[in-house]
Amino acid sequence: MIIAIDGPSGTGKSTVAKEVARRLGFTFFDTGAMYRSFAWFIVQKKCDPANEVEVVKSLSDFHYRIQNHPLGERRYFVGEQEVTQAIREAPISHVASQVAIYPQVRKSMVKIQREFGKSADAVFEGRDMGSVVFPNAELKIFLTARLEIRGERRFQELLKKFPDLAESLDMEQVQKEIAKRDETDQNRAVSPLKQASDAILIDTSDLTVSQVVSKILHLSSEITNCYPRKRFLYGFIYWLVRGYFKVFFRLKIHGLHHYRRGSGIIAANHNSNLDPNVVSISCPEEVHFLAKESLFSIPLLGKLIRNLNSHPVFRGAGDTQTFKTILQLLQQGYKVILFPEGKRSFDGNLQPIERGLSFLVQKSKATIFPVYVQGTFEAWPRLKKFPKPFGKIILAFGSPIEWEEFEGLEKKEAEKEITEKMGRAWAALKKWVEDGAQGTTP
Ligand code: DC
């Protein structure tokens, strides 16, 4: 799936596109960085950006490489030289805009972008993603904002990136440069910056980054919810275990429309040793979970559960190591199943939520997908050695809890709010299930 995000500079495009990609577990591709890297190359070669013939000639020596760090950080290289920082400087912005008008330059860049788009689910950010490069993108967004707001944002960004330049930076000058770049980008003959006819326009002037991200995530889950293929082993066990619960426990799964692919915490109530299995095979994509470290040293089983995305929890290492593992998984765009009550219930009732959940949400900015499971306690309660052979299990996904709801709150307050909201979500799902599981889940 491709999400194309276009718009002029200062609309928050990069920040938004990066966050959308992270939340969906997609690759992020900043095409502006590509034009900037080429501009940097031109400047290094002392080639005149106004000389089209010279610029086009340089294309054959331009070797561009992106290094993607698993935690989301990107580094850009031209040949062996890292240019990540250098391409953000103002003179490079100007040259990038200048060389981006040449048809041969665009043709070369577009070719690489399309190649890249073939191999991955990605968020592409630029000026012509929806209109030229990916006319068939599943979701096209065009971001705008008022000029003075864009100027202010760029000014703040520059101040943050280059604090040494605080004295010489001038807001009016930054605004003028943006207006000039808009004009070049909008009026060039080839692929001018313009909204594709089927792109959705979002004016970000009075919205926070989180609000824009939420809007796009919402649109993406409305348009399509396709999940990456499961690996063979995972898929095989998934269907086997799913079949078992469907046949012997008449498993019913509700509320899947609330489910979204990519990064997030699946927060389920915990009644029984059956819960990790039931919850994981109810999710339509591969999910990750934690398991006791001792299980990993059992021959064969250890290897199998590792292959099924289990991660060891080390007793004695404290919570730090466990939290670190979960945070890394979330950063890499995975779903992690957690049982925020910490331990299995003795009576099948909901228990208090531990603080770990809110800590993780605040650190990772992850979405919580509340899940309520009913019937696993009856099937295999805590004090019984073996499960019953038959039973009835119901699992319900509730409305996602977005971390943006708690953004800006003081730490303690956020902790309280997150815990309470989670508790209310479970209570509502429990009631919905007990009332006969009719209609859509809350
Ligand atoms: O998004 P940005 O400011 O990093 O982009 C730098 C320049 O590259 C900008 O002036 C326009 C150009 N560009 C383009 O022409 N087409 C793209 N797809 C992306 C950027």
Image (cartoon, rainbow, N blue to C red):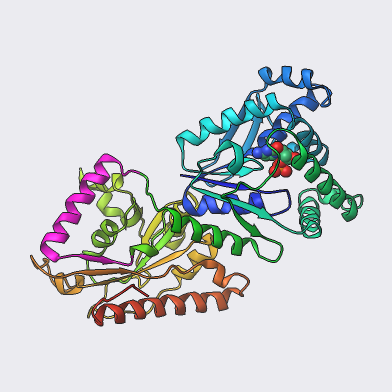
Tell me where residue 257 appears, x and y as whole percent.
37, 63
Query: Height in image: 190 above or below 164?
Result: above
Farthest residue toward the front? 197
Of the pair 183 and 39, the residue shown nearer to us: 183
Classify the position of the N terminus by image quarter: top left
Magenta span covers which residues?
229-255
The reply to whether residue 85 is in sight is no
Of the pair 178 and 240, the residue shown nearer to us: 178
Tell me where residue 266 appears, x and y as whole percent.
38, 63
Of the pair 423 and 402, the residue shown nearer to us: 402
Instruction: Please report the residue visible at 25 percent of the width from the left and 82 percent of the height from the top.
Output: 435
Classify the position of the C terminus by image quarter: bottom left
Quadrant containing ligand 1 reads top right
Quadrant assignment, res 352: bottom left
Quadrant assignment, res 260: bottom left
- 363 relative position to 321: left or right: right
Instruction: Please report the residue visible at 24 percent of the width from the left and 61 percent of the height from the top.
Output: 278
Farthest residue toward the left? 389
Residue 224 among those drawn in magenta = no
Quadrant assignment, res 37: top right
Query: Height in image: 35 above or below 258?
Result: above
The reply to whether residue 57 is in sight is yes
Tell me where residue 402 appears, x and y as whole percent.
50, 67
Q: Main secondary structure of the magenta part?
A: helix
Number of marks in picture? 0
Residue 250 among those drawn in magenta = yes
Of the pair 202 and 322, the residue shown nearer to us: 202
Instruction: Please report the residue visible at 12 percent of the width from the left and 66 percent of the height from the top.
Output: 387
Tell me where residue 80 appears, x and y as whole percent.
65, 25
